[in-house]
Image (cartoon, rainbow, N blue to C red):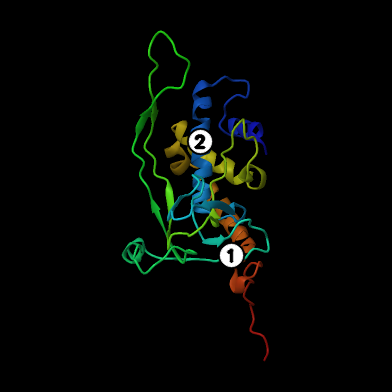
């Protein structure tokens, strides 16, 4: 399903006329999609969102900032450029930040191929920047840059040359919108996306009590979301090989009668 189809389905389920210019509904659409997709990606681990993100390490610099869409890290592979499929990757070990600060820097440790790494957050204080707009008779207001908390990879020892680090882990996909009309969830799991959006929409319609306490009046969209989520979680687990014995098959039913020896 694309963006317009998802919005039409939500308006139908929410009893909002399709030809209605409901400004309040239009205002909550971005927040609703942000809630739904953010919640789903936090609660479920999809193989499709585990990707490799390359970052460049600078010689003698132990810190490198991760892209903003990287949420979780499973491994970091370091290779010398140019990186190809046949390039050899070296995988440093993740340790505690206190251990890295205790052992590095030390005179006996020289820069080289990183052997250890940690993940820390770096607080960037809010600031104001000059407005780059064209000059006018009145001074332009400065641009405000909000507080940020980017994640940083810190290596030990510091790299002795420029390396490429391949960060493998979960990323946050771009949210569904008019400019991004189809996403992974809207294409493969649109029923889950719509159910989660309806949880938010029923709250907007002040119907939380009805959906939980009066099933005859309104369907419990939270219960519907949980039911769909449990089925998709099993499917996603099989795709990741998380079944018994790393199999992609669901658990077999136990035999009703004992088999003969």
In the rendered image, the vertical position of residue 214 relative to residue 252, given as above or below = above
Q: Secondary structure at mark 1?
A: loop
Residue at the bottom extreme of this rendering = 261
Decide which of tag 1 and tag 2 comes sooner along the chain. Answer: 2
Q: Are marks 1 and 2 in contact (CB under 8 Å)?
A: no
As drawn, the label of residue 32 is 2
**Residue 229: image location, x then y, percent:** 56, 52
The residue indicated by pointer 1 is 89
Residue at horizontal 46%, vertical 22%? 132
Whether residue 112 is visible, yes or no, is yes
How far is mark 1 from mark 2, CA to CA?
41 Å
**Residue 25: image location, x then y, percent:** 52, 26
Residue at horizontal 61%, vertical 71%? 246
**Residue 205: image location, x then y, percent:** 47, 31
Whether residue 221 is visible, yes or no, is no
Q: Nearer the viewer, residue 180 or 232?
A: 180
Left or right relative to 192: residue 101:
left
Left or right relative to 235: residue 153:
left
Q: Nearer the viewer, residue 28 or 133?
A: 133
**Residue 13: image location, x then y, percent:** 59, 34
Neighbor class of circle 2 (other Cα within 10 Å; few <14, some 14-19, many 20+) is some
Q: Secondary structure at mark 2?
A: helix
In the rendered image, the vertical position of residue 197 relative to residue 251, given as above or below = above
Nearer the observer: mark 1 or 2; the answer is 1
């Amino acid at each position: 399903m694309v963006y317009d189809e998802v919005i039409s389905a939500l308006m139908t389920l929410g009893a909002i006329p399709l030809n209605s210019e409901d400004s309040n509904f239009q205002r909550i659409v971005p927040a609703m999609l942000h809630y739904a997709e953010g919640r789903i990606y936090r609660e479920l681990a999809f193989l499709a969102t585990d990707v490799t993100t390359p970052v460049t390490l600078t010689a003698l610099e132990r810190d490198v900032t991760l892209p903003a869409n990287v949420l979780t890290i499973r491994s970091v592979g370091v290779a010398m450029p140019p990186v190809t499929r046949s390039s050899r990757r070296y995988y440093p070990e993740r340790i505690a930040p206190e251990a890295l600060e205790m052992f590095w820097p030390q005179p006996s440790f020289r820069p080289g191929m990183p052997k250890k790494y940690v993940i820390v957050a770096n607080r960037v204080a809010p600031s104001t920047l000059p407005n780059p707009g064209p000059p006018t008779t009145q001074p332009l207001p400065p641009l405000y840059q909000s507080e940020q908390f980017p994640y940083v990879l810190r290596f030990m020892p510091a790299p002795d040359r420029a390396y490429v680090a391949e960060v493998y882990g979960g990323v946050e996909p771009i949210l569904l919108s008019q400019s991004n009309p189809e996403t992974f969830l809207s294409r493969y799991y649109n029923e889950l996306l719509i159910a989660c959006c309806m949880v938010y929409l029923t709250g907007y319609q002040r119907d939380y009590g009805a959906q939980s306490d009066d099933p005859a009046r309104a369907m419990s969209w939270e219960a519907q979301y949980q039911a769909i989520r449990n089925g998709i979680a099993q499917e996603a687990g099989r795709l990741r090989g998380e079944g018994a014995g790393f199999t992609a098959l669901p658990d077999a039913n136990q035999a009703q009668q004992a088999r003969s020896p």
